[in-house]
Image (cartoon, grey):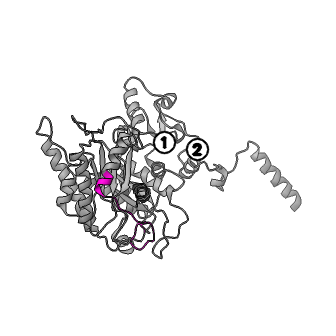
Amino acid sequence: MDLQKKLEILSGAAKYDASCSSSGSSRKNVNGGLGNNQSSGICHSWSDDGRCISLLKILLTNICTYNCVYCVNRATNDIPRASFTPEEIVDLTINFYRRNYIEGLFLSSAIIRNPDYTMELMLKTVRKLRIEHKFNGYIHLKAIPGTDSALIAEAGQYVDRMSVNIELPSNDSLKLLAPQKKKESIIKPMGFINSKILESNEVGRFYKKPKKLFVPGGQSTQLIVGATPDHDFNILKLTQGLYRRFQLKRVYYSAYVPVLSHPNLPAVARPPLQREHRLYQADWLLRFYGFKAEELLDDNHVNFSSDIDPKSDWAIRNIHLFPIEINTADYELLIRVPGIGVLSARRIINARKMCSLGYEHLKKIGVVLKRARHFITCRGKYYGEIGMNELLIRNFLTDKPVNLQEQNSDWQQLSIFSHIADSNILENNSLLLS
């Protein structure tokens, strides 16, 4: 099979892996070297510092000994198969870089023979790039679950980021859809990578020019959403635990793509992209807004609403905490207001040191007033038009018609002539009875 056909097959097979965004590594070029991971290049993936990095995203092979029900590369699936040699991947990466097509490499693989054999081939590839060709661009390597720790330890010296995909959020899900995978074989390398990162960072503090860091861009993982009955609350609690235990840079969510038909898989017509989006929004709240999974969801409210974002949903369900005064609320409370982000909250804190803020100032600061006005006061004045009513605010934020009379069947329009009408009715009734 020619190289072009292999590239077509193995780049297509890699598209289902979402955890390939690059992150804050800054590997510099050296004399006689090729490439760097600095702020230049044609870009497709976002880095930790806000820039984009284009990556050659491929599999080493899509020949797999595992038979995971949800995976397009499963052993029993009838698809074209191909494998790269380490030398072919090196040549592709170097040639694409020289043409300015890419700035780095994302390399993953199906399991060929066994995890150790697969990892050895991937290690050989990145070693050739770094040592023989002095390639200093970005490399993201997928660590294979079940691999010997020594292989991961060596690979971590050459790459900028590693990821170990959990994919399914519970033991029951693994048993149902991926019986050859075990939770321990996934968690163990994640713990090992984290310990090596912490060790490398600690040693680096004692050097004026630190030695080469172990996986300087950190590690990430991916969860598949919608392939199992697991609800959002379980997924979010798992995410929270991963961030706390392994200090992950990112947890990526991938909406289940119905590429195969199987009794254990849900019968869905399209990927649950809205659900994926809500989980990303909630993930952002966990990482940057100080929320906990148990605040956003609970046993009585296990899935996010498709109509409203998680932050607004939390605020409406906790309406007793609002409204807050813009000129006195602390930063932690400000960022919990729908429509106020991290940047706008900092601007409010800084601006109110100079003067008391009015409603007209908030739009200039960057506050989304359509949402925020229902939860704040400015100089003691409340600007929401519908009061602190949970249902009315929810309808307003989801662009549903707000009808006060329908919300309360006992509500009646007051009339200055109501007492006159009542006396006329009584008079007419008395005439009929007489």
Q: Residue under circle 1? A: 375
Q: Which mark is residue 386?
A: 2
Q: Position of residue 327 (x, y in %)?
A: 41, 32
- N-terminal of the pair, mark 1 or mark 2, is 1
Above/below status of 96 relative to 244: above
Let me know if residue 186 is in the magenta part. no
Question: Can I make out residue 245 in this image?
Answer: no
Residue 337 position (above or below residue 429): above
Left or right relative to 387: residue 21:
left
Question: Marks 1 and 2, Cα distance to the nearest angstrom?
Answer: 11 Å
- Whether 349 is drawn above or below 269: the answer is above
Q: Position of residue 74 (x, y in %)?
A: 40, 69
Mark 1 residue element:
loop
Q: Quadrant of residue 387?
A: top right
Q: What kind of residue is marked 1?
A: Phe
- Label 2 Cα crowd, 10 Å radius (few <14 / some 14-19 / many 20+): few
Q: Which residues are magenta?
A: 70-89
Residue contact at pointers 1 and 2, CB within 8 angstroms? no
Residue in the foreground of this view, choosing between 176 and 7: 7
Three-letter code for the amino acid on which mark 2 is drawn: Ile
Residue 400 in the image, given as x and y percentages of width and height: 62, 50
Q: Residue at x 32, y 53 (%)?
A: 89
